[in-house]
Image: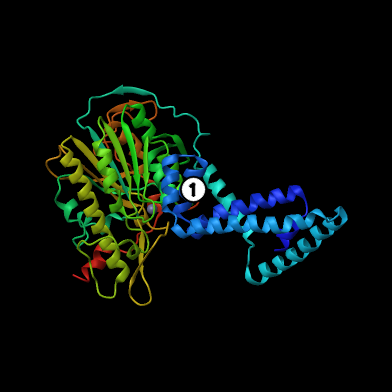
Amino acid sequence: MGFVIALFCFRFTRWLLIFVICGSALYFPVALISGVISRGILLAVLETDTREAVSFITSLPIESIFYVLAILVSLIFVFCMIAPLFKEVRLKGRIFIFFIPLAISSLVTVYLDKKYGYDPVIVSTAVGIKKLYREYKILDISSLKESSWVIGGKNATEYENYIVIIGESVRADALSLYGSPFKTTPFLDKVPKRYIKNYFSPAVNTSLSVPRILALTDEKGRVIEENNAISLARQAGYKTFWISSQGFTGANNRTAARIAKFSENIYFTKTFESDFALYSEIDKALSATGPKVIFIHMTGSHEDPCERLSDYSGPKHNIPKQKMLSCYLTSVSKMDQFVEQVYKKAETKGEAFSLIYTSDHGLSMKEDLTGSLVIYRDEQFRESYIVPFILISSTDQETKEYNIVRDGWHFIDFFAFWIGVTTNYTIDNYNIFEAESTLDPQVIGYHEKKHSVLEKKIDLDLKEYLLRFQ
Ligand SMILES: [Zn+2]
């Protein structure tokens, strides 16, 4: 209150007060529901996208409109009441009135902050707006160099539709296709496909791995963002779609979101991170005419997989006293169902298609003191990087297992080959199933330095562990 009284003293501080209160009023509903909404306000306010702005406003709780109105009406009322009182006060008096409440308020604020960690509304609003602006700057790719792909040659390809599904935290040995004694992936087990047994993701977490799968990197493993699979596909004449149930903002999502921004069509789920919420967007993408590449970024099986199953009604795995492990295996079955649905959608469309499923990284597992398995992430273990790599297409008639070693750093080389182009940066005709073997796959841990995966420790043998419960 002291701050408010102080700001009434002079004309310019009154304008400042109006600005701050209006800002607070508008920011208030956002502060009530942060997270996904901050993405909405980013797009709506900073990119002035009308459609997004409308969907953002309609996604706010109805009462927030009343909050905003209440704050604005109170502002007008307080202004009309107090402003005339100051007309009579001379300059000396105003300076006095300015400093005394300001000093008292500052002391009270410092005390409350020290004792209770309290932030005045003005400060938290300013911090919130600053955070949003920072997020916007991070997501802004307009300052990046133009992509410098040069397409050398274009081959006729068999397919009209290319689909890349990037899963979340799926370690290969949790799939029955990769040896899990629990039947977690009935669809992937039976559908004709080609799949690689020893496939290493480039990095230990989403934000480090996804851009390194999808974009070129330099010899140190740094991402050359502008030269990515989406910009290449566009240059090669494909329509591009990015459909994601992962968030748009926040430390874990930004790097993938920056790559996503290269796509002509971008969709992120708005409120609930459900993979199944992507189906209608996938239908829309498949209905577009002409050759296209559809990237699907799943939420999948993150640590604490139990949190991500409320939308899933398929078969569940229940191992006594193994809640986390049961949820994890169920989340893998959920992924299997999701891939099956995408496959069926592509099949129903009647156009030739090719679909890749891989995961951004794996996970580590260990037993806690109670004998339950816990799922976590440790860059020291190989299983944090070993993920599935499966290709299913409308022309594959039989299943072929490739017991070979490959890594995600070469995904972009394969991608070029897959969509039928040769380029200035990718290895020509890199057929991932037949290319030269990767002898020493490199991976990146949290410190963003490349290490040989051979230096990593071997994690708990999930297959062995699961056999106990058979
Ligand atoms: Zn991830």
Q: Is residue 385 visible?
A: yes
> Counting other residues with Cα less than 10 Å from the Cα at mark 1, is it few (<14), some (14-19), or many (20 or more)?
many
In what quadrant of the picture does the N terminus appear?
bottom right
Indicate left or right for 322 with 96 as reference. left
Q: Is residue 216 above or below residue 378?
A: above
Indicate left or right for 73 with 429 as reference. right
Image coordinates of residue 205 in percent, x first then y, are 42, 52
In what quadrant of the picture does the C terminus appear?
bottom left
Q: Is residue 401 visible?
A: no
Residue at numbered disc 1: 41
| Residue at the (60%, 51%) spot, across then down | 23
| Residue at the (35%, 59%) spot, across then down | 458
Image coordinates of residue 305 in percent, x first then y, are 33, 62
Q: Residue furthest bottom?
A: 370
Mark 1: which amino acid? Ile
Counting every numbered tag in the picture gives 1
Which of 58/127 is in front?
58
Which of 2/368 is in front?
2
| Residue at the (28%, 31%) spot, across then down | 419
